[in-house]
Every structure is written in structure tokens, then in C-alpha cells.
Amino acid sequence: MWVLLSLMAATLLGLGTVLQQRGTLDDPRGSAGGGVQFLAGLLRRRVWLLGIAVGGLGEIWQFLALGSGPLAGVQALTTLSLVISLPFGVWLTDQRLTRSVWAGACATTLGIMLFVLLGAPQIGISSAAATVWWTAGLTGAGLVVILFCVAFGRSPAVQAMLFGAAAGLAFALVSAVSKSLIGHLGGGLGEVVTGWELYVLAGFGVVGFTMGQFALRTGALAPAMASTNSVTLLGAVVLSLSVFAETFSPGPGHLVAAACGLALTVFGVILLARAPAAELEEP
């Protein structure tokens, strides 16, 4: 069941991201808009709001998948949103798909299949010690700040990758905290509201969302999506092992398959990052 839920989440997230990019590219202020003014202006764009709604539905499906599946497996399948977004990008934002992009899409898909089908990630513990969460949260927050500061003054493609990586780290933490939050739903609304998970999830969600919008604003959909998805996947795998003690199916073959799948996925997203950038529309 979690496999189907994850694939539905990937489809909605891919479409939602392209719709959001369409809204950012239609900004009549062009590259002059930025910061709070840029984000506030997006609230007046219907296609961008539609992208937020579609992406929100994708997040709900992913949340449901995390309730019954391993964090590493669910995140791996939702990473397919990168591949799914490509045809939507051709349709909505005039993205051009080169041979390297097609090769990257194939490599990414094959890598994820190896990771999920042969690596077969297994569910671990449902909760972790406070010290483990503090270490994960502070490390992730520090890396996000560094990537954000380094991104300014770079070329659009590099900015897209750096902002995307920052978003990916935040989203990996959101996925991990979401899985922890699911374990408290049985205790009722009171336990959810009084717990720390809801507020940390919201905080990293806002950070990831903001970094993602800056990445999309560069006009380079593929580098932004590649960086966001690859870092989210790698971050989620690290958190699945370090926080939730998830494992792979017994036997060295499964571990090798998982490692090869991750490596092939990263190679695929590097190829995808070479896709030509979408052009901003003239006012």
C-alpha cells in the first residue's frame, strides 16, 4: 500500500512543482523581484496557488505512505517526482529535453527501482532519543544556513542547485519528523498539539518551501528539482539509519543493491541538472 501512496505523492509533487515554477516565471517584475516582495507577489498568481494546492495534496499522500512504510523507501519513490516533472515542464514551462536529460531520467528511475525492490528497506523503530533529534536538527539547520549564504552571487544554475540542496535538507527533516508525528496520532489531538514534532515540522516546512521558491525562481527547473530531490533522498536515508534504525533486507546482496541504486540515482540527477533553463516571459 505504501508503494502506491508514494507513487501518487510523486505524481502530485512533480505537477505541483512545475505549476509553481510557471507562476514564478510569469512574474512581470522579472529578476528584479526578490525576497519578501517576490514571495508576496506570488500570492496573487493563480497558477502558483494551484501548484501549492497540488503539491499540498502530494504531501498528504506522502504523509499517509510514511504511516505504513519505511522512511527510506517512501522518500526514494517520491523522488520520482523529478522524472515525472519533466513532461509537465515541457508542456507548461517550455523545458527542452536533451539526450542527457533522457539518460538522467532513465538512470534515476532504474536507481530508485534497485533501491526499493532489491535493497528492500525495512521499517525500524518508531521513536528516538532526544539527543539524536537535537543532533539531526541542529546539523540540518546549520547546513541550510551555509548553503543559503553561499548561493548568492552565483550563476542561475548553481543558485538553483544550492537553494535546492537547502530545500532538500529541510524536506528530509520534514519527512523524518512527519514519521515521528504519525506515532502520536493515536494519542489524540492533545498529544499532537503538546508535542514538539508539529512545530518543528512546520518550521522546517517553511524553510524548505522558501528555499524551493528561490531555487525555482532561477528558471532552471532541472537543477532545482535534481538538487532538491537528491539531497532530500540522501538526507532521508541518513535519517532513516541514524534516527529510526531502519535496515535493508538481510544479506550483503541487498545492501549492495541499495548502495548501487543510490549511486545510480545521484548519477541520474547530475545528468538531469544539465537540462536547459526555462526562459522568463517578457512583461
Image: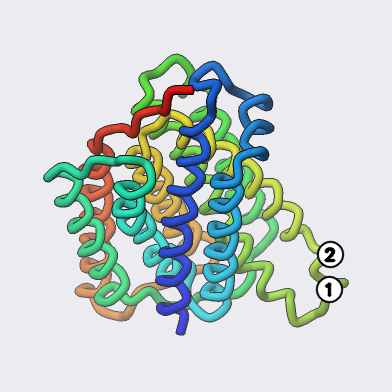
Q: Is residue 177 above or below residue 137?
A: below
Neighbours of disc 1 within 10 Å: few (<14), some (14-19), many (20+): few
Quarter of the image for residue 197 reads bottom right
Residue 246 in sight: no
User: Where's residue 262, x and y in %?
Assistant: 28, 57
- For the residues labelled 1 and 2, the Cα–Cα distance comes to 6 Å
Residue 262 in sight: yes
Q: For this rendering, which residue is in front, 5 or 11?
A: 11
User: Where's residue 92, x and y in %?
Assistant: 38, 47
Neighbours of disc 2 within 10 Å: few (<14), some (14-19), many (20+): few
Q: Residue at x 21, y 60 (%)?
A: 260
Q: Is 224 on the left or on the right of 56, as rendered?
A: left
Q: Is residue 127 above or below residue 88?
A: below
Q: Residue at x 53, y 22 (%)?
A: 149
Q: Is 275 on the left or on the right of 13, as rendered?
A: left
Give the residue type that dot 1 points to. Answer: Leu
Q: Which mark is residue 189?
A: 1
Q: Is 226 on the left or on the right of 68, as rendered?
A: left
Q: Residue at x 57, y 41 (%)?
A: 139
SS class, disc 2: helix
For the residues bearing labels 1 and 2, Cβ distance under 8 angstroms = yes
Q: For this rendering, which residue is in front, 272 or 192?
A: 272
Quarter of the image for residue 176 reads bottom right
Q: Which mark is residue 132?
A: none
Q: Residue at x 38, y 63 (%)?
A: 76
What is the tally of numbered marks visible in this picture? 2
SS class, disc 1: helix
User: Where's residue 226, x and y in %?
Assistant: 34, 45
Give the residue type that dot 2 points to. Answer: Val
Residue that numbered label 2 is attached to: 193
